[in-house]
Image: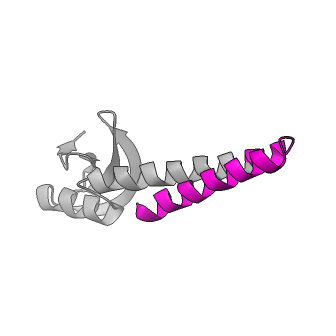
């Protein structure tokens, strides 16, 4: 997070210097503002990951298998109750295919 703030400060300094030296340097200004935008998006993404209780497909599989016995057939990212999450496709011991949703934000596991 300190790195992102440092990059943003440097970017703002560059922007101010470009505007003072050459008011017509629109392309350079655009490049700096684009870089700042990318940095801010990366920082927001990192902050959101830190808030999640389930951060990987492997964790989602562990939670699903702990609550529901069976062989995992497939795991994919999905939305669960409006939150980021995972959909886990399982094959039960008696041959029934079923799906389990794992809410990444809360860690809640539910069978569909």
Residue 94 showing in the rendered view: no
Tell me which segment is drawn in magenta.
1-30
| The N terminus lies in quadrant | bottom left
Q: Quadrant of the C terminus?
A: top left
Residue 64's x, y, as percent?
21, 56
| Magenta highlight: main SS | helix
- Judge by depth and name the residue closer to the eye, 15 or 94: 15
Q: Is residue 71 above or below residue 29?
A: below
- Decide which of 89, 49 is in the foreground and name it: 49
- Depth check: 5 or 46 in front? 5
Residue 20 in sight in this render: yes
Q: Position of residue 6 (x, y in %)?
A: 50, 61
Q: Is 76 placed left or right of 100 in the picture?
A: right
Asked if residue 105 is positioned above or below residue 74 in the image, the reply reads above
Q: Is residue 24 above or below residue 47?
A: above
Residue 106 sits inside the magenta stretch: no
Image point 15% across, 60% down: which residue? 69
């Amino acid at each position: 997070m300190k790195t992102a703030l440092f990059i943003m400060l440097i970017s703002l300094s560059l922007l101010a210097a470009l505007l003072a030296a050459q008011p017509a340097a629109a392309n350079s200004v655009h490049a700096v503002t684009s870089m700042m935008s990318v940095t801010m998006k990366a920082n927001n993404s990192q902050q959101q990951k830190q808030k999640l209780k389930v951060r990987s497909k492997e964790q989602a599989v562990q939670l699903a298998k702990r609550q529901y016995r069976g062989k995992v057939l497939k795991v994919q990212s999905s939305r669960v109750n409006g939150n980021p999450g995972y959909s886990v496709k399982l094959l039960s011991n008696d041959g029934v295919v079923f799906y389990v949703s794992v809410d990444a934000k809360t860690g809640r596991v539910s069978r569909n």
